[in-house]
Every structure is written in structure tokens, then in C-alpha cells.
Amino acid sequence: MSAAPRFEARGVARAFRGGAGVHGIDLDVAAGEIHALVGLNGAGKTTLMRLLLGMLRPDSGALRVRGVDVTRADASTWARVGHLVEHPLAYAELTGRANLEVAARLHGLDRAA
């Protein structure tokens, strides 16, 4: 019996007014696997990453991280997830440490963590 995937996507779709987005994505990422999203500009790579990380909500389908629906994942779930997106969300006027502290608070972690 294999372990549950760390990330799961089932029939995930997200559209935008101007078109594009992702449609009917199915994906499993198991512990220890490395995946690369490769495609042309506008193919949906960043959209899929943001969906998997709970930064966007899907129009349809299901997304799970470590067995938890991404829309219900709490700080303890996200504390075990590392990610890097092409355009990191950071505040230019803050130091690197201050940006990390803001991100930690947004994910429910306190300063002691």
C-alpha cells in the first residue's frame, strides 16, 4: 500500500475573464518526488502553483495538501510545505527578515515559532 500523495489535484479548473487558466488538471505528487511545470507563457504554470498553495480558489475540482483540502489547511499543514514561485510576494520596503515575519503571521505562526 502506497502512502497518500503530498499534493493531489482532481479535475481542477480555474478560468479568468481574459481566458486562459487551467482546465481538468489531475496530479499526484508523492513524498520525495520532484516535478517541474514546463510550458509556454500563459500555459497555466503559475496558476496551478497558486491553486496548489491555496493562494487561488479553483472554479471546480478538488485540491489537497497532505490529505487536507487546501481551503481548510491550517498553519500546521502549511508549516510542512516549502515552495518557490516565479514572482514571490514580498514587500520591497521591508527587509528579508521582516518579509518572513509577515508571511509567518499570515500563516498563523507567532513570533516564538
Image (spheres, grey):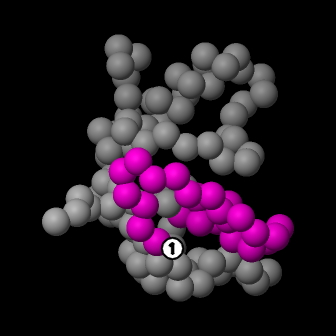
**Residue depicted at x 55% and y 43%:** 83
Residue 38 in sight from this viewpoint: yes
The quarter of the picture where the C terminus appears is: top left
**Residue depicted at x 33% and y 61%:** 5
The correct choice, above or below, for 62 with respect to 87 in the image is below
Q: Which of 80 and 54 is in front in this view?
A: 80
**Badge 1, how many Cα within 10 Å: few under 14, some, many 20+?**
many
Q: Name the residue under label 1.
A: 58
**Residue depicted at x 71% and y 64%:** 38
Secondary structure predominantly adopted by residues drawn in magenta: loop
Residue 59 in sight from this viewpoint: no
From the viewer's perspective, tell me whether residue 46 is left or right of residue 48: right
Q: Nearer the viewer, residue 21 or 84?
A: 84
**Residue depicted at x 76% and y 83%:** 19
Answer whether residue 67 is magenta in the image: no
Give the image location of residue 64, x and y in percent. 36, 63
Q: What residue type is labelled 1?
A: Pro
Give the image location of residue 45, x and y in percent. 68, 65
The correct choice, above or below, for 56 with respect to 90 in the image is below
The quarter of the picture where the N terminus appears is: bottom left
Q: Quadrant of residue 37?
A: bottom right
From the viewer's perspective, tell me whether residue 4 is left or right of residue 37: left
From the viewer's perspective, tell me whether residue 14 is left or right of residue 20: left
The local secondary structure at tag 1 comes to: loop
The correct choice, above or below, for 93 with respect to 62 in the image is above
Give the image location of residue 41, x and y in percent. 83, 67
| Residue most extreme to the right | 41
| Residue most extreme to the front | 1
Magenta highlight range: 27-51
